[in-house]
Image: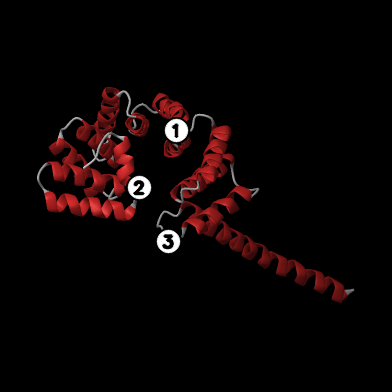
Amino acid sequence: MKRVVLGGFAALVLAAFAAPALADVQWQVFERRRQACYNSAEEFTPQESIRGCSDLIGMRSITGDGRAQAYKLRGDRYRGLRDWEHALADYTQVIRMRGDHPGAYYRRSEVYLAQGQYELAMADAERVIAIVPDTPGGYRVRCEIRVAQNIELDLARQDCGRALEINSIDTAALSARGVLNLRAGQNQEAWADFDAAIFNGRSDARTLYGRGIAGLRLGRVREGRADIAAAEQLQPEITATFASFGLDR
């Protein structure tokens, strides 16, 4: 009997020590998944971040807001990989869970724009403006939609201008306004817009090609040709994209 009592006591002691250790391990696992999902320090690959978000979504202990945020972040990773289908599914899930979530509407509008689904993109951009009228995203996407369709360019300029009033270094708005300035023959202004976008981190095919066209028109031939060559290296179809805007060399 004494052995049984001592054995039971030992088991209780072990359990008392094991419980905090298990809780600590569980916390470390959760924190690692959270870090991967949020990826604030950009130390994880997109695929690792997606797995971290998926793990969080599957955890019973996570709150509704936390799960919605994990869907949003996973959608962002899919969007970065140009996996439009999965990105749309995640953003739509956030909206289903949290209703007026401006970030999900904003990112979904960008995906619809990338897919050429302009009516859906416009509806989401309008929703963003209605929810958070003092942020640039909705105005900027609405500007880009009109630029992509080559319609209502005066309204597009107003929207890009509004976005830049709110955030003077919104690089996508600068790029879209650069296209508008090229179409209007305002080549110095176009060059300045594309150059500002590049300076502030958006050195992509569109900004390089746009600055290249502006440079050629301004007589900056060597710089213009270099920008166009760099843009075509990044995205061979960029010439066709600008031709759809009514712009060529």
Q: CA distance from mark 1 to mark 3?
A: 27 Å
Rendered view: 30 above or below 188 = below
By what rule are the colours in the image chosen?
secondary structure
Residue at x 42%, y 27% (from the top left corner): 122
Residue at x 19%, y 54% (from the top left corner): 226
Foreground of the two, 210 or 176: 210
Q: Which percent across, then down, holds residue 22?
A: 64, 63
Q: Amino acid at mark 2?
A: Glu
Foreground of the two, 128 or 142: 142
Rendered view: 53 above or below 89 = below
The residue that label 2 is drawn on is 237
Q: CA distance from mark 1 to mark 2?
A: 32 Å
Foreground of the two, 31 or 56: 56
The residue that label 3 is drawn on is 43
Q: Are marks 1 and 2 in contact (CB under 8 Å)?
A: no
Q: Which percent across, then down, holds residue 37?
A: 50, 53
For label 2, the SS is: loop
Foreground of the two, 118 or 239: 239
Corner quadrant of residue 196: top left
Q: Nearer the viewer, mark 2 or mark 3?
A: 2
For label 3, the SS is: loop
Q: Quadrant of the C terminus?
A: top left
- Classify residue 140 as left or right of residue 68: left
Q: CA distance from mark 2 to mark 3?
A: 32 Å
**Chain-order first, disc 1 or disc 3:** 3
Structural crowding at the residue carrying mark 1, measured as other residues with C-alpha within 10 Å and reported as few (<14), some (14–19) or many (≥20): many
Q: Quadrant of the N terminus?
A: bottom right
